Every structure is written in structure tokens, then in C-alpha cells.
Image (spheres, rainbow, N blue to C red):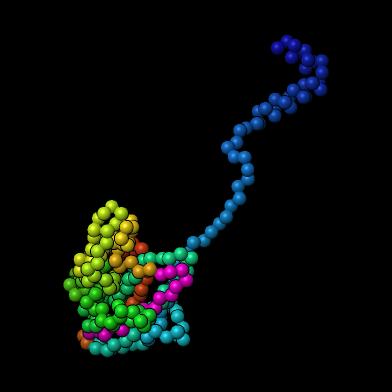
């Protein structure tokens, strides 16, 4: 220590050098990275874009996201067409649901329609009358037949509907765990996991798929009950979780 003090007294220059060395050691650190960090920002949007127009399928019609349909009367039929395009570069699957909203605090009884004709891309074997294949999606995601619905159920104002086209299927499938399950136990029965034989099941029978860049067109022609009056909003969406979607729509 005495030698260091003597050195500082003898040489002001030496003192400055030692001070710099001490300062340099004090500010040194070990970092956990050895490179810069390039960053990419990405915006992720819903993969399926849907549209609607009045009338039956027509490639010349202008597709919009909202339309005021021509006023009609109880006992009359009307048609509207929805489109769904997959914007993703992979196959997309989801549940195609329709929501009937009476609005203004009115009730949806489930008896507003006496018939519902369906036309999918003009050439599907699934086309025809579907009124008995419409299921009400309850607030927990389970299904019940529209014919059995009561307006005292999950929502007085709205109904979330699912078309159970394959609900009467008798097909069976065996998965990789050698479990054998029927595709369906009846219209509006539980949506049990089902899939191609020898695969791990991740989907149910009512999962509809769109290939990359594919557009699907569905035309609905409901016939209103002669006693039905009111202002109704009809919307359609692809959803991937029936329970969460129904709870959201019903405000649960």
C-alpha cells in the first residue's frame, strides 16, 4: 500500500492510468447474447372470409358482409346465399353456424320457420329440406333438435343453429388406439370425435373443411311461419369452438 502511495506521489501520469484501469474494470459485464436481434412483426387475421347476398347462387352477384333483405311476409319463402373463402395456405376446418337474432327484446321461439331448403354449390347430395337437421347449440356447446327447443331455454332473443347433415350416418371408424366409434348416434346427438381409420381423431362429424383458396357457397331458402312477425337478423360464421361461441352469443 505504501508503495502505491509513493507511486502516485511520484507520477501524476501513473495515477491517471491506474484510475482509468479501475474505471474500466468497474463497468465491464458478461452478457447472455452474442449477436444482434432481428425482429419481424406479423399480423394474423381470421383465415375464412364470409359474405352474403340476396337470392340463390349467382356468380354475378356482389358479395357483401351485410345486407338488408327484401321485406317478406309470414307464409312466404325467401332465399339468401352465403359464401366462405379460405384465405390460408392450408386446409381449414370449422363448424358452420347460423345465428337468428330477433332483436329489440323479442323472443326467438324456434318455430319461426316451417321449412328450410338447402343448396350447397348446386351439386351436393346434401341438398334439400333440412328443417329436421337443424340443431340448437346450447350454451355449453351441446346440441338439441330445433323442433324440441323452447323459448325458455338458453336465450330468448337469439338462437345459434348448426346443420347436422351427417347426423343420421351409420359409419364407424377405428382410431390408432383401436377405439371404434360411430360417426353419429342420431341427428343432434353428441359430437364425439371421429376421423379416418387409423388416425388420431381431432374432429367431429360436423366439421366442414375448406381447402386452400377454396370458396364454398351455401344457399338457404326458409319459409316463414304464417304467424311469424318481427325484425330478424340472420348471420353465419365458421367457428372452431361451439361452446365458447354459443356462450358468447348468449351472453353467458
Note whether 2 is above or below 142 in the view shown: above
Residue bounds of the magenta highlight: 210-225
Q: Magenta stretch: dominant SS?
A: strand
Q: From this viewpoint, is residue 109 visible?
A: no
- Residue 10 occupies which quadrant of the picture? top right
Verify whether residue 104 appears in magenta: no
Q: Nearer the viewer, residue 227 or 202?
A: 202
Q: Nearer the viewer, residue 12 or 65?
A: 65
At x 37%, y 85%, the residue is 56
Q: Nearer the viewer, residue 179 or 146?
A: 179
* x and y percentages locating residue 174 in the rendered image: 27, 58
- Residue 140 occupies which quadrant of the picture? bottom left
Q: How many marks?
A: 0
In the picture, measured across the screen, residue 9 lies left or right of residue 84, that is right
In the picture, measured across the screen, residue 15 lies left or right of residue 112, that is right
- Residue 165 occupies which quadrant of the picture? bottom left
Indicate the quadrant containing the N terminus: top left, top right, bottom left or bottom right.
top right
Indicate the quadrant containing the C terminus: top left, top right, bottom left or bottom right.
bottom left
In the picture, measured across the screen, residue 243 lies left or right of residue 15, that is left
At x 17%, y 72%, the residue is 148
Note whether 102 is above or below 199 in the view shown: below
At x 29%, y 87%, the residue is 77
Note whether 204 is above or below 74 in the view shown: above
Note whether 225 is above or below 20 in the view shown: below
Verify whether residue 220 appears in magenta: yes
* x and y percentages locating residue 26 in the rendered image: 65, 28
At x 28%, y 52%, the residue is 177
Q: Nearer the viewer, residue 39 or 219?
A: 219
Q: From this viewpoint, is residue 179 visible?
A: yes
* x and y percentages locating residue 230 in the rendered image: 28, 82
Amino acid at each position: 500500500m505504501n508503495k502505491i502511495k509513493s507511486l502516485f506521489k511520484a507520477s501524476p501520469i501513473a495515477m491517471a492510468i491506474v484510475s482509468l484501469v479501475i474505471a474500466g474494470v468497474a463497468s465491464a459485464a458478461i452478457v447472455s447474447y452474442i449477436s444482434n436481434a432481428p425482429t419481424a412483426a406479423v399480423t394474423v387475421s381470421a383465415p375464412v372470409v364470409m359474405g352474403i347476398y340476396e337470392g340463390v347462387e349467382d356468380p354475378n352477384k356482389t358479395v357483401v358482409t351485410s345486407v338488408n333483405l327484401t321485406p317478406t311476409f309470414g307464409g312466404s319463402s325467401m332465399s339468401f346465399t352465403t359464401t366462405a373463402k379460405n384465405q390460408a395456405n392450408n386446409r381449414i376446418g370449422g363448424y358452420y353456424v347460423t345465428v337468428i337474432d330477433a332483436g329489440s327484446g323479442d323472443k326467438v321461439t324456434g318455430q319461426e320457420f316451417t321449412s328450410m331448403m338447402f343448396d350447397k354449390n348446386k351439386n351436393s347430395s346434401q341438398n334439400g329440406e333440412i328443417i329436421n337437421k337443424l340443431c340448437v347449440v346450447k350454451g355449453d356447446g351441446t346440441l338439441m333438435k330445433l323442433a324440441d327447443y323452447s323459448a325458455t331455454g338458453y336465450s330468448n332473443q337469439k338462437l345459434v343453429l348448426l346443420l347436422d347433415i351427417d347426423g343420421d350416418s351409420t359409419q364407424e371408424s377405428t382410431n390408432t388406439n383401436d377405439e371404434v366409434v360411430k360417426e353419429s348416434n342420431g341427428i343432434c346427438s353428441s359430437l364425439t370425435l371421429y376421423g379416418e381409420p387409423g388416425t388420431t381423431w381431432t374432429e367431429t362429424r360436423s366439421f366442414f373443411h375448406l381447402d386452400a383458396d377454396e370458396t364454398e357457397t351455401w344457399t338457404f331458402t326458409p319459409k316463414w311461419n304464417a304467424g311469424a312477425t318481427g325484425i330478424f337478423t340472420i348471420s353465419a360464421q365458421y367457428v372452431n369452438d361451439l361452446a365458447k361461441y354459443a356462450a358468447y352469443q348468449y351472453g353467458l
